[in-house]
Amino acid sequence: MAVSPGTPSMASPVLAVDGVSVRLGGRQILDEVTFAIAPGEFVGLIGSNGAGKTTLLRVILGLQPTTAGTVSVGGGPHARGRGLVGYVPQKIQLDPDMPVRARDLVGLGLDGNRLGIPLPSRHKRELVDQMLEAVDATRFASQRVGNLSGGEQQRVMIAHALVSKPKLLLLDEPLANLDIRSAQEIISLLAKICRQQQVSVLISAHEMNPLLPVMDRIVYMAGGRAASGTTDEVIREDVLSQLYGHHVDVLNVHGRVLVIAHAGEGFEILAGDEAAAESAHPDHAPSRSEP
Amino acid sequence: MTWLFAPGFFASSPVHVALVVGGISALVCGIVGTFTVLRGQSYSGHALADLSVTGGSASFLANISPLVGFAGTGVLAAGVMDMISNRQPRGRDLATGIVRGAGLGLAALFLYWDATSSSTTGATITILFGSMFTVGNDAVPLVAAFGLPALAVVAVLYRPLLLSSVSPELAAARGVRTRLAGLACLLAIALAVSLAAITVGAILATALLVGPAAIALRLASTPGRATLAAAAIAVAATWLGIVLAYDSFTWPPTHDGWPVSFFIVVLIFVAFVAAQAIRPGRTLRARGTTPGSPADGMRA
C-alpha cells in the first residue's frame, strides 16, 4: 500500500517507481512502493534499519528483481549499465594495501565497465580533475583511497558516481559512520552539486534531521511501505500513523523532528536524532551520553 | 661476470629452455597474480595449486606432459569452484576447501602409483617441487599456448576486474557482469598456477603467483604500475634463481646442484620482507602527506 499525499504529477520524471513490491523468502521487503523524482530534486529516503531502503535502491539499479510493479529511469527500464544512475553503496571497506588512488577510482567511474587496457587520455584526465575539484578532493587525489578518512572516501565515491554525468545519484546511508562535521560537509556538498549539475539526488538515511534543510521532498519508509511528498506533507501524525499501522507522535524539539511510538510503559524514537534514539531505545544501554 | 654466471651457462640447452619457460611463466604469474591478490583470491590460487598436483601426478601415469595435467585439473577445479560457490566469502572458502580435499586425496593415490610403477620418487619431486632443467624443448609452445589466454583475460577485463576488486556492488551497478568476469579471472588463475607448477613445482606455485604481486602492490602507486612491476619482479626472481641453481652445481654437500625452486622462492621471500620496511604508496610519485602512523604501514 502506498501513501502518497500530494505527489505532484510530473511531466518527465527522472525516476518513477510504480507499485514496486519485493518478496524474499516469504518476507515482504517492499510493499507497493510508489513515488517519482523530478529533474534536479533532492530527495531523502528516510527509515530505520530494515525498512527496505537498500532493497529499494537495488531495485532502481536493476540489481534486485521485483515481484510486482515497474521502475522507469529517464523514461526507460531499470538503470543497470545505462549510465543514467550514479551509485554510492553502503560502507565499502577500502584496503590501504590496494594501490588505487582517489583519481584511479574516479576514472573507473568513467570507464570501469569498458573492456581492454585503458590508454592515457587527456580528455579523461580533464574530466577526472574537474570532478575531483567539484567534490573538493584535489588535495588528496593522488593518495590511496584506503588511506583516506571516512569523509574523504565518501567524497571520492561521490566523484566516482558523478563523473559519468548521470541524471540521478543514489546514495545508500552515506552519512553513517561519519562524525557530525563530516556529515554536514557531505550534505552541503551534495546539495551544491544537485543544484549546479542539475542531477537528482536520492539519499537514504535513518536520521532525517541533518537532511531537513536541503530536502525538496521525502520518501519515508516503514516496514516496506513508503509515503512521499514534501516534509510538511509526510512528517505528520496522521500520515505516519497510517504508514506504521499504529499511532505515532511527531514532536518538534528545538527544530529537530522526532517520531515516537508508545510501546508499553516506555516509548521508542522511530526516527529523528540518532543519539537520542539510541539512548531512549530499550535495546540500547545508554552507554554513549550525548550532551 | 663469471662470479655470477658459471662457465657453460649460456651454452647449455637445458638452461635456454629453463630461461624461456621460466620467463614466460613468471611473466604470466606476475600479471595474473596482481589481480589474484587485488581480488582477495590468494586462497583460491593456493587451492588450485594443490589441485594441480592431481593432474600433474595423473599425467605422469598417462605419460603426457605434466603441464597438460596441471592446467587440465586447474581449469576443471576452477569451474567446479565457481559452480558451488555462492559468492559469500564463507561459502566460497568452504566450497574451495571441499574440492581441494577431494583433489588431494586423488593426488595421494596417483603419486603412490607413480612412485611404485617407476620405483623412484623422481615424478613426485618433479610434480611437487619442479625441476626446471629437465623441462623438454617441446614444452615451450605449450607454455605459450597456456599463458596467452591467461594474459588475454587480464588485458580484456582489466577495468571491470579492477572495479569489482574495489567493490563488486559498484561494478555490478555499472553493468559489469561480475559473475562472468570472476569465472574468467579464476580460469586465468588456474592457467597461471599450472605454469607456476612447471616452474617451481605445484606446492610452491602460489609463491610465484602471489609473492611478486604482493610486493608490487605494496610499492607501486597505481594498479597499472603494480601489474608491470609484479611481472618484472617475478621474471627477475625466476631468472636469477636459474642462474644461482646453475652455479650451485659446484656447491656442497652433493655437488649435484640445489633446486631452482628453492632459489626462486627464497629470492621472492627476501624481496617481500624487504618491501615490508617501505611504507606503501610512498615510492613512485606519491605526493602530499599520507595520513596514518608508521603502525598503519606495518598492517600488511
Image (spheres, coloured by chain):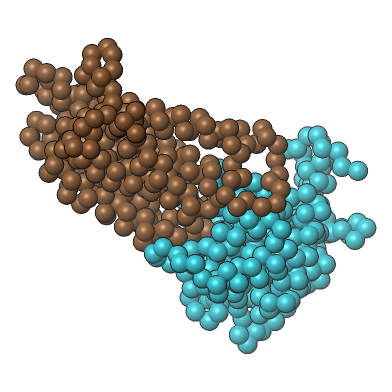
Chain colours: A cyan, B brown
Residue A136 at x, y percent in the picture: 73, 63
Residue drawn at the location 28% of the way across and 23% of the way down: B248
Query: Outermost residue toward the top?
Result: B253
Left or right position of B259 against A152: left
Residue B209 at x, y percent in the picture: 37, 39
Residue B71 at x, y percent in the picture: 22, 42
Residue drawn at the location 71% of the way across and 73% of the way down: A194
Q: Quadrant of the N terminus of chain A?
A: bottom right
Closer to the camera in the image, A153 or B219:
B219
Closer to the camera in the image, A57 or A221:
A57
Task: Give the vertical position of B201 relative to A113 (above or below).
Answer: above
Closer to the camera in the image, B8 or B98:
B8
Asked if one can make out residue A43 in the rendered structure from this viewpoint, the answer is no
Left or right position of B284 against B94: right
Left or right position of A120 against B141: right
Residue drawn at the location 38% of the way across and 52% of the way down: B182
Q: Quadrant of residue A116?
A: bottom left
Q: Quadrant of the C terminus of chain A?
A: top right
Query: Outermost residue toward the right?
Result: A254
Task: Give the vertical position of A124 relative to A186 (above or below).
Answer: below
Closer to the camera in the image, A166 or A253:
A166
Asked if one can make out residue B142 in the rendered structure from this viewpoint, the answer is yes
Residue A225 at x, y percent in the picture: 63, 62
Residue drawn at the location 91% of the way across and 56% of the way down: A253
